[in-house]
Image (cartoon, rainbow, N blue to C red):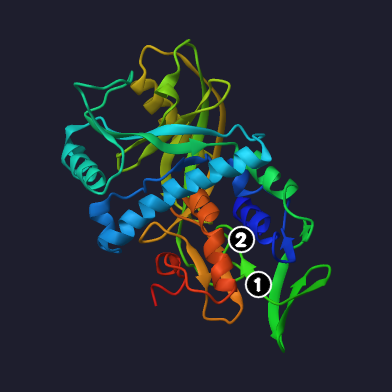
Amino acid sequence: GGGINGAILNYYLSKNHNVVITEQGKIGCCLTSVATALLEYQLDDFANDLQKEMTTKQIVDCYNLGLMAIDKLDDLISQIGNKCFYSKRPSLIFSASQKDDKKIEEEYLFRKSHGFDCELITSDNNPFDFEISSGIYCKNGGAEFDPYLFTKQMIENAKNQSQIFEHTKVVEYKRQNNYFLAKTLYATIKAKKIIISTGFNFELINKEIADRFVSYSIIANPHCRKKIFNNTLVQDTNSSYHYARALPNGKIIFGGEDTKFNQKYLGLKKAEKKYKKLADTLKKMFPNVQFDIEEEFCGMFASTPNNMGYIGKTNEKDVFYFFSCGANGILNAIFCTDLIEDVLAGKKNKYEKIFSPLRDE
């Protein structure tokens, strides 16, 4: 796979291994190109909900992994240069309704009790220009970049022991003695190990390992001088939740209104309803600001019960998954390159269980 996860993995693995990337289309031009890239340490679910799937320690570990990944990304950008509009950002998760005040306060107390730097926002101390009943503000809680340009940088800065083949779909792979033969439409690749990193396309593994959804987004150009959302990564707690971030040119990506992916029921009429609802929601948040809706697009994402992707060993010897889906899949991909290095070398990694493709078996 040659999306953002495959490109990240290639960048790090090519330092010590001979790597071949196969991509059925063009590098970074499928779901990567429509990713909204809100990079946050917090997850889609609060700690109280995650405790059905993980221990308290694992939840705290996951939050810390997100913060460590942001630091790792920060170091990486300082080494290779910033050609992808990377920037660290504060994050805010909020509710405009009092019905979520209790669970937001509980999440805030959970984070504070485990040493996370955050602030409880209420209607009394709200610094934003939209209505907030309660929220959690994290000054160093996130980052953003252009996902396609970042993928391009990862490819361009990889060591020369990586080979990249676009428009090259692997249709099957088979073990032969102590190596694999990966068959494409044009040729066969011989490899000692295989890592499947095909985003949310599970065709090669022939099973659905995560729930897939479609998320809708608009790009809005506000007619005002003030920075909408204060350069903060924003997410609400609505059942059909919304998220937003500012672009370097002052425009806004505003998205959400997710629906379960159904290949038989994807149409323009449905999408147009979602885009209109997003525009109406944004205008309701800022009734005194005029917005021009300049672009509309949608993309797929996948979710797992514990919000973590499937990364590591599988039941098949020398076949590994690198499906970094979930709430902060890009950050986990950046962090989990070390995990993959360890499992390739037969070493234990202390985070292996959280991401293990075998954890639900």
For label 2, count other residues whose C-alpha is less than 10 Å away and answer few (under 14), some (14-19) or many (20+). Answer: many
Residue found 44% across the figure and 65% down from its top: 355
Residue found 23% across the figure and 53% down from its top: 48
Count of marks placed on residues: 2
Q: Is residue 245 above or below residue 25?
A: above
Q: Which mark is residue 175?
A: none
Please indicate whether residue 28 sits to the left or right of residue 331 in the image: right
Q: Position of residue 211 (x, y in %)?
A: 44, 60
Q: Nearer the viewer, residue 344 or 124?
A: 344
Tell me the CA gap for discs 2 and 1.
12 Å
Identify residue for label 1: 194
Q: Is residue 236 above or below residue 52?
A: above
Q: Name the quarter where the C terminus is drawn.
A: bottom left
Q: Name the quarter where the N terminus is drawn.
A: bottom right
Q: As shown in the figure, which amino acid type bears the numbered disc 1?
A: Ile
Identify residue for label 2: 198
Circles 2, 1 touching at the beta carbon (< 8 Å):
no
Q: Position of residue 130 (x, y in %)?
A: 32, 21
Q: Residue furthest right?
A: 186
Q: Is residue 340 above or below residue 88?
A: below
Q: Position of residue 358 (x, y in %)?
A: 44, 75
Q: Nearer the viewer, residue 259 or 53?
A: 53
Please indicate whether residue 77 sits to the left or right of residue 222 in the image: right
User: SS of the residue at dot 2?
Assistant: loop
Residue found 58% across the figure and 41% down from its top: 34
Residue 267, visible in the rendered structure: no
Residue 62, visible in the rendered structure: yes
Q: As shown in the figure, which amino acid type bears the numbered disc 2?
A: Thr
Residue found 59% across the figure and 82% down from its top: 317
